[in-house]
Amino acid sequence: MSLLEVRELSRHFGGLAAVNNLSFIVDEGEIHGLIGPNGAGKTTTFNVISGFYKPTAGEILFGGRRISGLRPSRIAARGVVRTFQATTLFQELSVFENVLIGCHMQSQVGPFGALLGTSRRAERASEVRAAEILEFMGLGDRRDDETVNLPHGHQRALGIAVAIAAEPKLILLDEPFTGMNPEETRQMMVLVERVRSQGVTILLVEHDMQAVMGLCDRITVLSFGELLAQGTPIEIRSDPAVIEAYLGTV
Ligand SMILES: Nc1ncnc2c1ncn2[C@@H]1O[C@H](COP(=O)(O)OP(=O)(O)OP(=O)(O)O)[C@@H](O)[C@H]1O
Protein backbone atom coordinates (compact mmCIF):
# COMPACT_ATOMS: atom_id res chain seq x y z
CA MET A 1 0.00 0.00 0.00
CA SER A 2 1.35 3.41 -0.89
CA LEU A 3 2.28 5.66 2.04
CA LEU A 4 3.92 8.56 0.20
CA GLU A 5 2.93 9.66 -3.26
CA VAL A 6 4.95 12.29 -5.10
CA ARG A 7 2.85 13.49 -8.06
CA GLU A 8 4.30 15.43 -10.99
CA LEU A 9 6.44 17.46 -8.60
CA SER A 10 8.46 20.43 -9.80
CA ARG A 11 10.56 22.87 -7.83
CA HIS A 12 12.28 25.68 -9.67
CA PHE A 13 14.85 28.16 -8.40
CA GLY A 14 14.69 31.11 -10.78
CA GLY A 15 15.28 29.55 -14.20
CA LEU A 16 16.69 26.31 -12.77
CA ALA A 17 14.43 23.26 -12.59
CA ALA A 18 15.99 21.51 -9.56
CA VAL A 19 13.12 18.98 -9.70
CA ASN A 20 11.02 18.60 -12.81
CA ASN A 21 7.76 16.65 -13.16
CA LEU A 22 8.88 13.95 -10.74
CA SER A 23 6.50 11.15 -9.72
CA PHE A 24 7.21 8.19 -7.47
CA ILE A 25 5.54 6.16 -4.75
CA VAL A 26 6.93 4.88 -1.45
CA ASP A 27 5.07 1.87 -0.11
CA GLU A 28 4.33 1.39 3.56
CA GLY A 29 7.10 -0.57 5.31
CA GLU A 30 9.70 -0.35 2.57
CA ILE A 31 13.18 1.10 2.48
CA HIS A 32 13.15 3.23 -0.66
CA GLY A 33 16.34 4.69 -2.09
CA LEU A 34 16.53 8.07 -3.82
CA ILE A 35 19.81 8.27 -5.71
CA GLY A 36 21.50 10.17 -8.51
CA PRO A 37 24.50 12.36 -9.32
CA ASN A 38 25.37 15.51 -7.37
CA GLY A 39 22.85 18.23 -8.11
CA ALA A 40 20.22 15.76 -9.37
CA GLY A 41 17.56 17.18 -7.04
CA LYS A 42 17.50 14.66 -4.17
CA THR A 43 17.88 17.16 -1.33
CA THR A 44 15.40 19.51 -2.98
CA THR A 45 12.90 16.63 -3.13
CA PHE A 46 13.47 15.97 0.59
CA ASN A 47 13.01 19.66 1.34
CA VAL A 48 9.70 19.77 -0.51
CA ILE A 49 8.39 16.55 1.09
CA SER A 50 9.26 17.85 4.57
CA GLY A 51 7.78 21.27 3.87
CA PHE A 52 10.95 23.39 3.90
CA TYR A 53 10.26 24.33 0.27
CA LYS A 54 6.89 24.73 -1.41
CA PRO A 55 6.48 22.95 -4.75
CA THR A 56 6.40 25.05 -7.90
CA ALA A 57 3.97 22.49 -9.31
CA GLY A 58 2.59 19.09 -8.41
CA GLU A 59 1.59 17.67 -5.06
CA ILE A 60 2.58 15.23 -2.35
CA LEU A 61 0.17 12.89 -0.60
CA PHE A 62 0.93 11.12 2.65
CA GLY A 63 -1.46 8.39 3.70
CA GLY A 64 -3.77 9.61 0.94
CA ARG A 65 -3.89 13.20 2.28
CA ARG A 66 -2.20 16.14 0.71
CA ILE A 67 0.80 17.44 2.69
CA SER A 68 2.45 19.69 0.10
CA GLY A 69 2.11 23.32 1.11
CA LEU A 70 1.80 22.55 4.84
CA ARG A 71 4.33 23.94 7.29
CA PRO A 72 7.20 21.59 8.31
CA SER A 73 5.81 21.29 11.85
CA ARG A 74 2.40 20.20 10.51
CA ILE A 75 4.04 17.67 8.20
CA ALA A 76 6.14 16.32 11.09
CA ALA A 77 2.97 16.05 13.18
CA ARG A 78 1.48 13.87 10.43
CA GLY A 79 4.45 11.52 10.86
CA VAL A 80 7.03 12.62 8.26
CA VAL A 81 10.38 13.36 9.93
CA ARG A 82 13.73 14.03 8.31
CA THR A 83 17.35 13.87 9.33
CA PHE A 84 19.98 16.23 7.95
CA GLN A 85 23.36 15.73 6.26
CA ALA A 86 25.04 18.01 8.77
CA THR A 87 24.41 17.15 12.39
CA THR A 88 21.78 19.26 14.11
CA LEU A 89 22.41 17.85 17.59
CA PHE A 90 23.01 19.92 20.71
CA GLN A 91 26.72 19.19 20.98
CA GLU A 92 27.15 20.44 24.55
CA LEU A 93 24.28 18.34 25.91
CA SER A 94 24.42 14.66 26.77
CA VAL A 95 23.28 11.93 24.41
CA PHE A 96 20.29 11.27 26.68
CA GLU A 97 19.32 14.96 26.82
CA ASN A 98 19.27 15.21 23.03
CA VAL A 99 16.77 12.37 22.73
CA LEU A 100 14.80 13.64 25.73
CA ILE A 101 14.28 17.00 24.02
CA GLY A 102 12.92 15.11 20.99
CA CYS A 103 10.54 13.16 23.25
CA HIS A 104 9.39 16.36 24.98
CA MET A 105 8.59 17.99 21.68
CA GLN A 106 6.46 14.99 20.81
CA SER A 107 4.56 14.85 24.11
CA GLN A 108 3.84 18.54 24.59
CA VAL A 109 1.78 19.09 27.68
CA GLY A 110 -1.00 21.66 27.41
CA PRO A 111 -1.14 24.87 29.50
CA PHE A 112 -3.06 23.17 32.32
CA GLY A 113 -0.68 20.23 32.44
CA ALA A 114 1.43 21.69 35.22
CA LEU A 115 -1.63 22.44 37.37
CA LEU A 116 -3.05 18.97 36.91
CA GLY A 117 0.25 17.23 37.56
CA THR A 118 0.33 15.76 34.08
CA SER A 119 3.59 17.52 33.26
CA ARG A 120 5.51 15.47 35.83
CA ARG A 121 3.94 12.25 34.57
CA ALA A 122 4.70 13.27 30.99
CA GLU A 123 8.29 14.10 32.02
CA ARG A 124 8.74 10.65 33.53
CA ALA A 125 7.21 8.98 30.47
CA SER A 126 9.56 10.97 28.20
CA GLU A 127 12.57 9.87 30.23
CA VAL A 128 11.56 6.22 29.99
CA ARG A 129 10.99 6.53 26.26
CA ALA A 130 14.29 8.34 25.66
CA ALA A 131 16.14 5.57 27.49
CA GLU A 132 14.33 2.91 25.43
CA ILE A 133 15.18 4.66 22.16
CA LEU A 134 18.86 4.89 23.14
CA GLU A 135 18.96 1.17 23.92
CA PHE A 136 17.19 0.44 20.64
CA MET A 137 19.77 2.46 18.70
CA GLY A 138 22.71 0.82 20.47
CA LEU A 139 23.58 3.99 22.39
CA GLY A 140 22.53 2.85 25.88
CA ASP A 141 26.06 2.80 27.26
CA ARG A 142 26.72 6.30 25.85
CA ARG A 143 23.71 8.00 27.37
CA ASP A 144 25.61 10.29 29.74
CA ASP A 145 28.42 11.16 27.30
CA GLU A 146 28.63 14.72 26.07
CA THR A 147 27.46 14.57 22.46
CA VAL A 148 30.52 16.42 21.16
CA ASN A 149 32.68 13.49 22.31
CA LEU A 150 30.77 10.84 20.35
CA PRO A 151 32.51 9.17 17.41
CA HIS A 152 31.07 10.06 14.00
CA GLY A 153 29.07 6.84 13.60
CA HIS A 154 27.41 7.28 16.98
CA GLN A 155 26.55 10.92 16.19
CA ARG A 156 24.73 9.69 13.09
CA ALA A 157 22.90 7.04 15.12
CA LEU A 158 21.93 9.73 17.64
CA GLY A 159 20.52 11.90 14.85
CA ILE A 160 18.25 9.02 13.89
CA ALA A 161 17.37 8.43 17.57
CA VAL A 162 16.19 12.05 17.84
CA ALA A 163 14.09 11.57 14.69
CA ILE A 164 12.55 8.41 16.17
CA ALA A 165 11.62 10.37 19.30
CA ALA A 166 9.14 12.26 17.11
CA GLU A 167 7.33 8.94 16.49
CA PRO A 168 7.52 9.07 12.69
CA LYS A 169 5.68 6.86 10.23
CA LEU A 170 8.15 7.87 7.52
CA ILE A 171 11.77 8.88 8.10
CA LEU A 172 13.68 10.75 5.40
CA LEU A 173 17.34 9.85 5.92
CA ASP A 174 19.72 12.32 4.29
CA GLU A 175 23.06 10.62 3.55
CA PRO A 176 23.43 8.80 6.90
CA PHE A 177 26.47 6.85 5.65
CA THR A 178 28.61 9.84 4.62
CA GLY A 179 32.13 9.74 6.06
CA MET A 180 31.72 6.32 7.65
CA ASN A 181 34.35 3.61 7.69
CA PRO A 182 33.29 0.08 6.62
CA GLU A 183 32.57 -1.06 10.18
CA GLU A 184 30.45 2.04 10.93
CA THR A 185 28.63 1.49 7.63
CA ARG A 186 27.87 -2.11 8.57
CA GLN A 187 26.55 -1.06 11.98
CA MET A 188 24.43 1.73 10.49
CA MET A 189 22.90 -0.71 8.00
CA VAL A 190 21.85 -2.92 10.92
CA LEU A 191 20.31 0.12 12.66
CA VAL A 192 18.37 1.28 9.59
CA GLU A 193 17.02 -2.24 9.13
CA ARG A 194 16.11 -2.31 12.83
CA VAL A 195 14.17 0.97 12.52
CA ARG A 196 12.23 -0.45 9.58
CA SER A 197 11.46 -3.61 11.56
CA GLN A 198 9.46 -1.39 13.94
CA GLY A 199 7.10 -0.50 11.12
CA VAL A 200 8.75 2.79 10.14
CA THR A 201 8.98 3.40 6.39
CA ILE A 202 12.28 4.82 5.19
CA LEU A 203 13.20 7.07 2.26
CA LEU A 204 16.98 7.10 1.93
CA VAL A 205 19.13 9.60 0.02
CA GLU A 206 22.61 8.13 -0.15
CA HIS A 207 25.71 7.93 -2.35
CA ASP A 208 27.15 4.80 -0.66
CA MET A 209 26.03 2.18 -3.18
CA GLN A 210 26.92 -0.76 -0.96
CA ALA A 211 24.48 0.53 1.63
CA VAL A 212 21.81 1.50 -0.92
CA MET A 213 21.93 -1.82 -2.77
CA GLY A 214 22.08 -3.79 0.48
CA LEU A 215 19.20 -2.04 2.21
CA CYS A 216 16.67 -0.83 -0.33
CA ASP A 217 13.62 -2.71 -1.55
CA ARG A 218 13.19 -0.28 -4.43
CA ILE A 219 15.16 2.63 -5.78
CA THR A 220 14.21 5.84 -7.62
CA VAL A 221 17.01 7.39 -9.69
CA LEU A 222 17.09 11.11 -10.49
CA SER A 223 19.17 12.88 -13.09
CA PHE A 224 19.01 16.63 -13.72
CA GLY A 225 15.85 16.85 -11.61
CA GLU A 226 13.98 14.22 -13.58
CA LEU A 227 13.11 10.59 -13.08
CA LEU A 228 15.73 8.42 -14.78
CA ALA A 229 14.76 4.94 -13.57
CA GLN A 230 12.85 3.05 -10.91
CA GLY A 231 13.20 -0.53 -9.78
CA THR A 232 14.74 -3.08 -7.45
CA PRO A 233 18.47 -2.91 -6.68
CA ILE A 234 19.11 -5.70 -9.21
CA GLU A 235 17.19 -3.83 -11.92
CA ILE A 236 18.86 -0.51 -11.13
CA ARG A 237 22.37 -1.98 -10.98
CA SER A 238 22.06 -3.35 -14.50
CA ASP A 239 20.17 -0.42 -16.08
CA PRO A 240 22.41 1.04 -18.83
CA ALA A 241 20.99 4.57 -18.42
CA VAL A 242 21.71 4.52 -14.67
CA ILE A 243 25.20 3.14 -15.20
CA GLU A 244 25.94 5.86 -17.73
CA ALA A 245 24.46 8.75 -15.72
CA TYR A 246 25.54 7.72 -12.26
CA LEU A 247 26.81 4.28 -11.29
CA GLY A 248 29.74 4.51 -13.66
CA THR A 249 30.93 7.56 -11.71
CA VAL A 250 30.65 6.34 -8.07
N1 LIG B 1 18.01 27.15 -2.44
C1 LIG B 1 18.48 26.97 -3.70
N2 LIG B 1 18.62 28.04 -4.52
C2 LIG B 1 19.09 27.89 -5.78
N3 LIG B 1 19.43 26.70 -6.32
C3 LIG B 1 19.32 25.60 -5.55
C4 LIG B 1 18.84 25.67 -4.20
N4 LIG B 1 18.85 24.41 -3.67
C5 LIG B 1 19.30 23.61 -4.63
N5 LIG B 1 19.59 24.31 -5.76
C6 LIG B 1 20.06 23.77 -7.04
O1 LIG B 1 19.19 22.74 -7.42
C7 LIG B 1 19.90 21.66 -8.02
C8 LIG B 1 19.59 20.39 -7.24
O2 LIG B 1 20.26 20.45 -5.98
P1 LIG B 1 20.07 19.36 -4.83
O3 LIG B 1 20.84 19.83 -3.64
O4 LIG B 1 18.64 19.06 -4.67
O5 LIG B 1 20.80 18.09 -5.49
P2 LIG B 1 21.24 16.72 -4.80
O6 LIG B 1 20.82 15.64 -5.72
O7 LIG B 1 20.74 16.65 -3.40
O8 LIG B 1 22.83 16.85 -4.79
P3 LIG B 1 23.92 16.23 -3.76
O9 LIG B 1 24.02 14.77 -4.07
O10 LIG B 1 25.18 16.96 -4.13
O11 LIG B 1 23.46 16.51 -2.36
C9 LIG B 1 21.36 22.04 -8.00
O12 LIG B 1 21.67 22.58 -9.27
C10 LIG B 1 21.44 23.09 -6.91
O13 LIG B 1 22.48 24.01 -7.17
Image (cartoon, rainbow, N blue to C red):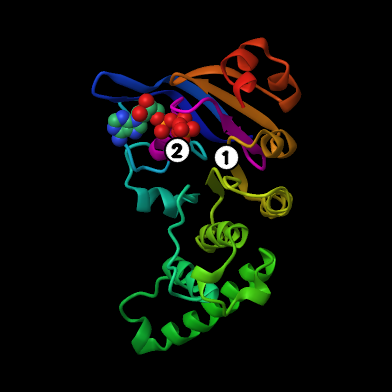
Q: Quadrant of the N terminus?
A: top right
Residue at 58 percent across and 58 percent down: it is 152
First along the sequence among labels 2 and 1 = 2
Check mark 2 vs ligand 1: CB closer than 8 Å? yes or no.
yes
What residue would you read off at disc 2? 46
Q: Quadrant of the C terminus?
A: top right
- Figure check: 187 above or below 231: below
- Figure check: 236 above or below 49: above
Near-viewer residue (80 or 192) = 192
Q: Specify whether 104 is left or right of 243.
A: left
What residue would you read off at disc 1? 203
Check mark 1 vs ligand 1: CB closer than 8 Å? yes or no.
no
Q: Amino acid at mark 1?
A: Leu
**Residues shaded magenta:** 26-49
* Residues marked 2 and 1 touching at CB (< 8 Å): yes
Q: Specify whether 37 is left or right of 185.
A: left
